[in-house]
Image: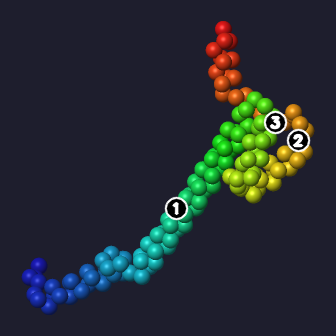
Amino acid sequence: MVPATRSTAGCLCATLAERRVRAGVGRPNLRHMLDASIAAVANAYVSWGNGKSSLEVETFKAESSRIFEMIKTGDPDKAAVNLQFLIDTGLVPNKTLLSISTYLKTRKHGQGISLPAEEFLKLKTRYKD
């Protein structure tokens, strides 16, 4: 084997560098930077979508909880007064507001939805045995 001289060593380095560039090894090229940018934009979009969905779910939970607490009276008339309070104070969104308003307009006195009051449930379970 012939010892490498300065000129042959320079040629070997240039050949290796050309092979690395062709193989995509070494400096990142435009394609790699574009791929990374697309991935970053896609991740940002997915994160935004997850955040929006989480907010919608939490809003629905809060709204449902408010309505359930208002009808836990054991009396349909008192539940109707409480629901009207939610409407008057603006604590329900427009979509639900229409449904509750329609219900309250068509409800007959003494009839309608109500859930047992918590005190009643506690007494019922205490004296059950």
The 10 Å Cα crowd at callout 1, few under 14, some 14 to 19, many 20 or more, is few
Q: Is residue 78 above or below residue 18?
A: above
Residue at 72 percent of width and 48 percent of height:
86
Tag 2 residue: 107
- The count of marks equals 3
- Give percent across and percent down for residue 42: 52, 68
Q: Label 1 is placed on what type of residue?
A: Ser
- First in sequence: mark 2 or mark 1? 1
Distance, label 3 to label 2, CA atoms, is 10 Å
Residue at 20 percent of width and 84 percent of height:
12
Residue at 80 percent of width and 41 percent of height:
80
- Give percent across and percent down for residue 103: 85, 45
Tag 1 residue: 47
Q: On the rendered image, what quadrant is the C terminus found in? A: top right
Q: Label 2 is placed on what type of residue?
A: Arg
Residue at 10 percent of width and 87 percent of height:
5
Tag 3 residue: 77
The 10 Å Cα crowd at callout 2, few under 14, some 14 to 19, many 20 or more, is some
